[in-house]
Amino acid sequence: MPKHIFSAPGRVEIGGNHTDHQHGRVLAAAIDLETRCEARVNGTNIVRINDKRFGVLDVDLSELDVRDSEKGSSESLVRGVAAWFKNNGHAIGGFDAEASSNIPAGAGLSSSAAFEVLLGNVFKGLFGADVTPLDIALAGQFAENVYFGKPCGLMDQTSCSFGGLTMIDFYQPQNPVITPIQSDLSGFALCVVSTGGSHADLTSDYAAIPSDMKSIALHFGKEYLRDISPGDFYSAISELRYLGDRAILRAIHFFEENERVLKQVSAIESGNMKEFIYLIGESGKSSLAYLQNVYSPMNPQQQGLTLALALSERVLSGAGAWRVHGGGFAGTILAFVPYCLKEEYQCQMNKVFGEDCCHFLNIRKT
């Protein structure tokens, strides 16, 4: 059987911090780091993947039930993506693959989503499934939610599957509107900085964000903030304080950030990079002050993200932009660094967070 080459990119979130779970808008970009493989049909029901990072995966597709013993493993993702394809009437089968990835694990660049999208592309390419990029994203989300055991949204898989810079509107979350954006970020390096913080014991912090936002929505008899008009929300703030001021502030972040994505897209499409960079900075300020996902209130002595943002401001003020990247509380920030400051910025980050903390990226078009 002939070998075929498949790949799937990682992604960065550029706008729309914590808006997707409230059915809001996100601006995201596929990047030039990828997970790839050479694969060929092996005529059995066994998927064998020799991954340079994680070793050998061996999954029997004749049994596609969820296995508790596989939760949190790469095997669960293989089984889950295969199950989605079979459940939706598409052919599956065994294959042998040699896989590798240059997406750093744990850097907030969606290495898991890239692997899921890669699997979807392999099943499509080898067995002729008539599926769209959105179908492949849905297969990845299904595998991660049901088989892997992580209740993620659809943003990561969608961005990895479609490629390029995209605005994703999750008003109908299982049928999001994906709008490709023509981008020209010339003059700026896109940099994700790993601050070395651990995501362990942060589950309650992450869970509190959608919980706070939904508590505001429930006051209006709705489940999600997207179903409430901003005017109704702002008119009712005095009534909402029984839910806690943090919930109100997080809702303010949602409404402002959801509209800010549209403004960011407009700035990019009109070539107004000064306005775009300003809006990235406003997004970062909102996450810090209103969304409050830059450090855990349970451990205020550890504020690696806040420190990275402060150092970024010192180097980039008036020239670039900086914001928390992704879920927050630990992990990474995203910076737009003018090329003339790239060396200085990297030097300053390396001094504090260690060599190789900076990941300079480009947007992958497809």
Image (spheres, rainbow, N blue to C red):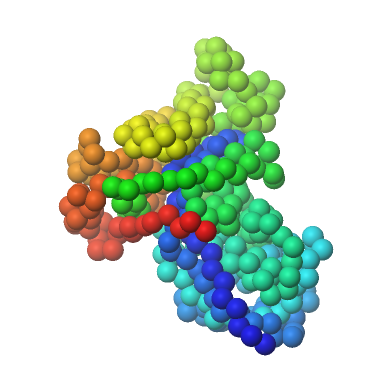
Up/down of 67 relative to 343, above or below: below
Question: In percent of the image, x 82 and y 63: which residue is there?
Answer: 89
Residue 278 screen position, x and y as percent: 33, 33
Residue 346 screen position, x and y as percent: 23, 55
Up/down of 255 relative to 154, above or below: above
- Is residue 200 at all visible to an observer of this figure? no
Question: In percent of the image, x 63 and y 67: which residue is there?
Answer: 121
Up/down of 362 relative to 334, above or below: below
Figure quadrant of residue 290: top left
Up/down of 44 relative to 166, above or below: below
- Is residue 107 at all visible to an observer of this figure? yes
Question: In percent of the image, x 54 and y 68: which residue is there?
Answer: 7
Residue 41 screen position, x and y as percent: 69, 82
Question: In percent of the image, x 47 and y 79: which residue is there?
Answer: 52
Q: Residue furthest bottom?
A: 1
For the residue pair 129 and 234, the one nearer the viewer reads as 129
Residue 1 screen position, x and y as percent: 67, 87
Left or right of 86? Residue 229 is left
Image mark count: 0
Figure quadrant of residue 40: bottom right
For the residue pair 66 and 40, the one nearer the viewer reads as 40
For the residue pair 42 and 20, the one nearer the viewer reads as 42
Left or right of 311? Residue 196 is right
